[in-house]
Image (cartoon, rainbow, N blue to C red):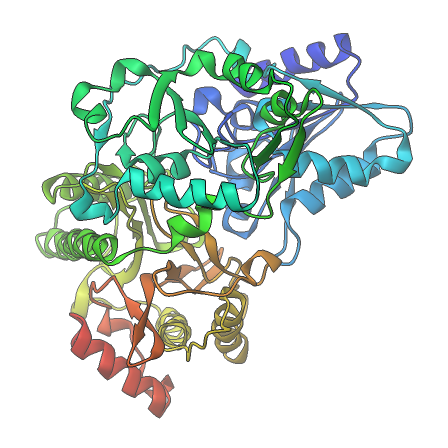
């Protein structure tokens, strides 16, 4: 019996005992992180699907796994169709909406829905409650995870230490950031603000760690009052060398004191106004702060999220260095493949992935910002192909999709994708794939050169990029993901977002960093994606997109006859500003 079968059997026995008809299983941890270790990822333990996002519903008869376009193929490959029904989401349907529709379809009046309160945001819970209001559904909140908490594999204990990032990189001290936040609290008459989003705590404190996979943040919770900031974390990792960077406005406490501290702060005759961000606060934490007479104040957006997204000059200069190192890795990796093939060496996808990781270490990376995607041939159709095949030998004519990134000294993520033909000029890739590459390149250039105004949103850029793909259709090839995402302390940062989703209708501002990454994929032939991380700058009183990435493009795959005159000009400009030469 497979491990997922065993976990599913145990879970169904638990549901029966607790009289729960359907259970929502989230892919996150208690901090609502995107990347969660397998032993803590209940969704993975139940379904076998290893993708970074995608929730599941479990009943006594069925398991429904919800995945977006990045994971359609991967979910089919990794799950047992006899046990798991993969619900493939389209670009215009958010996961939460699809899950709510399925819950409504399955649950009958007076039945019970189970939720794991530490792994579900309060915003998500509100949507569920509103959606089921007229069905008299009993919602049972579990303050433990019946899958991960009972999983027999011990949770990995990290030995990674904490480090303080110098102001030369961050551009602003922790105390100065705290002053801005306290000023905002005072203006809104907020008594204290509960903060549990890890990258925001990392931003505020300028502390980084690599104890969580593909993450430069550290496990912590925070409470910001009108006078100070309390950070709850592993005190053994807050060294004197770190403490010396903070004024007495910062206090570091053991994470076990978080609940008691909230109770203590609330134990006053004064009527308190307690702020939180519903999308970044789990349901369990919300219950802690909402009990009693005090008023909870849901913020439309976290006070720190916009501050964090607007990179200052010091941060941008450091990020430029990080991308320069990442460009080196990509170009060295591409050259390594060609040289290996020229020397008749048999290299596999796994060899290539290992080489990329080795090159990051050689180029001063602290950790990866996500698992290396090294897909060749048909496997490039897997948009997030994170399990490279140690038996798939790369051939001279294969197209390789390399998507990679890392963290360097400052703990800011990098992210870049290049698709290239393995054998260089001597290779003979399929003519159709050359056409696909060129169309993706056209869309990529359109995104890089979008005429930005003070009203431009990520939705607008996505619409322009997607328009190029739609105007140049290739039979059975699909663009099934957003054009881009924010990049910062986390590799997927919001704001901004560049996609057809409502959340992308946020105005882009100078200092924001985001990706432009159109792609086309066909399950039988493979896929092409080109990705640069960019920032928005103010130049001569005009907003302009500036690329942070500059690794070369593959001229062997460009069909210049398919480029219009404007695109040829853009390509020449890109050549002058970057390393690409025609």
Given residues 497 and 167, the one toward you in this image is 167
Residue 269 position, x and y percent, is: 65, 19
Give the image quarter of residue 546: bottom left
In the image: residue 484, left or right of residue 202: right
Image point (70%, 15%), residue name: 12
Is residue 396 toward the left or the right of residue 560 in the image?
left
Residue at the (48%, 8%) spot, across then down = 152
Measuring from the top left, give residue 310's x and y in whole percent. Answer: 37, 56
Q: Position of residue 249 (x, y in %)?
A: 34, 29
In the rendered image, residue 386, in percent from the top left (x then y), is placed at 37, 40
Q: Residue furthest front?
A: 269
Task: Answer left or right for 185 relative to 109.
Answer: left
Number of callouts: 0
Side (left or right) of 495 relative to 213: right
Q: Quadrant of residue 338?
A: bottom left
Q: Which residue lies at the image location 29% right of the left edge and 58% below the top edge?
A: 398
Q: Is residue 482 above or below residue 60?
A: below
Name the foreground residue: 246 vs 529: 246
The reply to whether residue 477 is visible in this rendering is: no
The quadrant in which the N terminus is found is top right
List the single residue furthest toward the bottom.
565
Above or below: residue 418 compared with residue 165: below
Report if residue 218 is visible in the image. Answer: yes
């Amino acid at each position: 019996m497979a491990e997922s079968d065993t976990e599913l059997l145990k879970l169904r026995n638990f549901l029966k005992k607790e009289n729960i008809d359907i259970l929502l299983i989230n892919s996150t941890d208690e901090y609502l992180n995107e990347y969660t270790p397998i032993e803590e990822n209940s969704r993975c333990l139940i379904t076998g699907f290893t993708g970074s996002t995608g929730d599941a519903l479990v009943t006594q008869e069925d398991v429904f796994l919800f995945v977006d376009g990045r994971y359609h193929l991967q979910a089919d490959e990794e799950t047992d169709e006899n046990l798991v029904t993969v619900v493939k989401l389209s670009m215009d349907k958010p996961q939460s909406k699809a899950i709510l529709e399925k819950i409504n379809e399955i649950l009958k009046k007076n039945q019970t829905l189970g939720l794991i309160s530490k792994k579900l945001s309060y915003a998500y819970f509100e949507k569920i409650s509103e959606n089921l209001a007229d069905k008299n559904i009993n919602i049972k909140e579990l303050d433990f995870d019946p899958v991960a908490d009972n999983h027999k594999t011990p949770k990995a204990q990290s030995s990674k230490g904490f480090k303080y990032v110098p102001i030369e990189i961050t551009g602003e001290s922790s105390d100065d950031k705290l002053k801005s936040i306290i000023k905002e609290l005072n203006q809104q008459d907020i008594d204290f603000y509960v903060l549990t989003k890890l990258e925001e705590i990392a931003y505020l404190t300028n502390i980084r760690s690599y104890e969580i996979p593909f993450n430069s943040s550290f496990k912590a919770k925070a409470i910001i009052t009108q006078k100070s900031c309390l950070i709850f974390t592993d005190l053994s990792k807050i060294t004197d060398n770190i403490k010396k960077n903070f004024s007495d406005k910062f206090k570091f406490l053991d994470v076990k004191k978080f609940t008691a501290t909230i109770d203590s702060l609330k134990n006053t005759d004064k009527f308190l106004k307690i702020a939180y961000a519903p999308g970044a606060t789990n349901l369990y934490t919300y219950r802690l702060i909402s009990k009693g007479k005090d008023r909870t104040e849901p913020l439309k957006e976290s006070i720190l999220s916009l501050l964090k997204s607007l990179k200052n000059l010091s941060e941008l200069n450091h990020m430029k260095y990080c991308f320069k190192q990442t460009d080196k890795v990509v170009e060295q990796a591409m050259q390594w493949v060609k040289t290996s093939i020229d020397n008749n060496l048999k290299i596999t996808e796994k060899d290539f992935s290992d080489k990329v990781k080795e090159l990051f270490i050689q180029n001063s990376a602290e950790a990866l910002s996500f698992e290396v995607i090294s897909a060749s041939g048909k496997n490039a159709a897997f948009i997030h192909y994170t399990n490279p095949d140690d038996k798939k030998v790369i051939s001279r004519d294969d197209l390789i999709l390399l998507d990679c990134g890392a963290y360097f000294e400052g703990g800011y993520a990098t992210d870049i994708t290049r698709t290239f033909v393995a054998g260089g000029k001597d290779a003979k890739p399929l003519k159709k794939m050359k056409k696909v590459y060129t169309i993706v390149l056209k869309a990529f250039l359109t995104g890089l050169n979008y005429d930005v105004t003070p009203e431009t949103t990520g939705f607008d850029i996505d619409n322009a990029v997607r328009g190029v793909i739609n105007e140049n259709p290739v039979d059975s090839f699909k663009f099934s993901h957003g054009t881009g995402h924010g990049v910062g302390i986390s590799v997927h940062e919001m704001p901004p977002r560049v996609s057809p989703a409502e959340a992308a209708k946020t105005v882009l501002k100078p200092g924001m960093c985001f990706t432009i990454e159109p792609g086309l994929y066909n399950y039988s032939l493979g896929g092409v994606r080109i990705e640069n991380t960019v920032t928005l700058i103010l130049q001569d009183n005009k907003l302009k997109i500036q690329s942070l990435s500059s690794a070369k493009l593959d001229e062997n795959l460009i069909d210049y006859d398919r480029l219009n005159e404007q695109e040829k000009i853009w390509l020449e400009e890109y050549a002058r500003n970057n390393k690409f030469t025609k």
